[in-house]
Image (cartoon, helix red, strand yellow):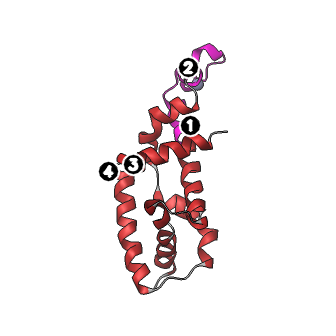
Amino acid sequence: MSCGYRMMCVWLRNLKPKYHGENNKSGDSFNKCLVRELQSLILKEVSDSCYGCQVDHPSQTQHDMCLLTDSDDQTDIFLISAIRKLDPYQIMEEWYPMLHTMVLDDQEKLEAVRLWEHFKNKIRFRPAGSWLEQLKIQVKQAWE
Ligand SMILES: [Zn+2]
């Protein structure tokens, strides 16, 4: 078994609590990485759609998108496009230090592959439903 495959399986095992709504330390850690990555993508979406940011305007009044919306509004507006740009592998990389402490059996590996496909599909094709609402709340709560 390749190291990359094993890494992915272990990572996916800890995705599970997120989907089943259980409280799990590792799951929370993964979620933190996910939320942090989404916030940075949302901020990029904001500046990409802000006239002042686009032309690097010195006057704050030209920054319509930066000024007229707060973090919660920005989350509402840009979360879906941020999710579409999210790279699941990048989160895995960030979360890598957690992975060495866990062990998988065969059943968990199978489950891991299933969850991996599920997660990628959610990210890439169908960001909707309670999963999206949950994520939105988490992102909003994490703004400082
Ligand atoms: Zn701006």
Which dot marks residue 130? 3
* Figure check: 13 above or below 142: below
**Is residue 120 found left or right of 24 in the rendered image?**
left
N-term mark: 3 or 4: 4
x then y, percent, for residue 27:
55, 64
Inspect the image, locate mark 4, and give the three-letter code of the amino acid beneath it.
Phe
State the separation of the CA atoms marked 2 and 4: 30 Å
- At 67% from the left edge and 39% from the top edge, which residue is drawn? 144
Inspect the image, locate mark 3, and give the three-letter code of the amino acid beneath it.
Ser
State the separation of the CA atoms marked 3 and 1: 23 Å
N-term mark: 2 or 1: 1
Inspect the image, locate mark 2, and give the three-letter code of the amino acid beneath it.
Leu
Which dot marks residue 43? 1
- At 34% from the left edge and 57% from the top edge, which residue is drawn? 121
Magenta part of the protein: which range?
A: 41-67
Residue under label 2: 68
x then y, percent, for residue 21:
47, 59
